Image: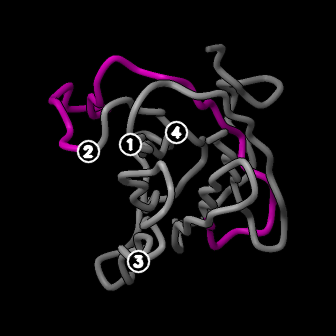
Amino acid sequence: MAEQASPGWPALGPDLGVGRESRVGRHEGYDRVVYEFTGPDAPNYRVHYVDRPIGDGSGAPVAVAGDVWLEVLVTSLGIPGESAPTADDPLPETLRGTGIAAADALWGGFEGVGQAFIGLDGEQRPFKVSTATNPSRLIVDIAR
C-alpha cells in the first residue's frame, strides 16, 4: 500500500507546537485515529506501513501492539518543556471493537520530526490521511 504524504514532504511545515492527544473512533466501514497538536495550522506529514516499528534517533525497536504498523511522521513538532503535560493516549475502551491495537499520541519531536505508530490487528488495510486546523489535527482513516 502506498504511502501518503503532504505536498512538499519532508520540508518543514508550520509550527505545530507539541502534541495534545490522540483519539480513536469507530465509524461505518473504517476506524479513525486523530492526532491533535497545540498549534493552529495543518501539519506536514508522511504515513506509511513499516515492517516493524523502529524509533527515530535511536534506531531501536519500539514495542507497539499489533500485527502490522503504520508509521506516522509530522514535521515542526516542538520539544515539550520539562513542566509540559504529557499528551494523552487514547482511552483503552475506545480501542475495543476497532481493528486498532495501539495509537499512542505524538508528543514531541526528534530534530523537528514527531514519530508515532498505529498498531493494527490482522493485515495491512487501505488508509487515507487528511488534516484540519484550529487546532492542528492529523486524521488517519483505516478501512475495516
Q: Which residue is mark 4?
A: 72
From mark 1 to mark 4, how far is it between C-alphas? 11 Å
The image shows residue 57, relative to residue 34, as above or below, that is above
Which callout, 1 or 2, points at the residue further toward the start of the chain? Answer: 2
Left of 20 or right of it: where is 31? right
Looking at the rendering, the stretch of residues picked out in magenta corresponds to 36-64
Q: Which mark is residue 119?
A: 1
Which label was assigned to residue 64? Answer: 2
Q: Amino acid at mark 2?
A: Val
Q: Secondary structure at mark 4?
A: strand
In the rendered structure, which disc, 1 or 4, sits on the residue that comes first in sequence?
4
Q: Position of residue 49 (x, y in %)?
A: 49, 23
Looking at the rendered image, the quarter that the N terminus falls into is top right
Q: Secondary structure at mark 1?
A: strand
Mark 3 crowdedness (10 Å alpha carbons): few <14, some 14-19, many ≥20: few
User: Which residue does the numbered mark 3 point to in the structure image?
Assistant: 93
- Residue drawn 18% across the image and 43% down it: 63
Q: Quadrant of residue 41?
A: bottom right
Tell me whether the residue at label 1 lies in contact with that at label 2, contact meaning CB atoms closer than 8 angstroms: yes
Q: CA distance from mark 2 to mark 4?
A: 13 Å
Residues at marks 1 and 3 touching, judged by CB atoms closer than 8 Å: no
Amino acid type, callout 1? Gly
Which residue is pictured at 36% across the width and 52% down the height?
101
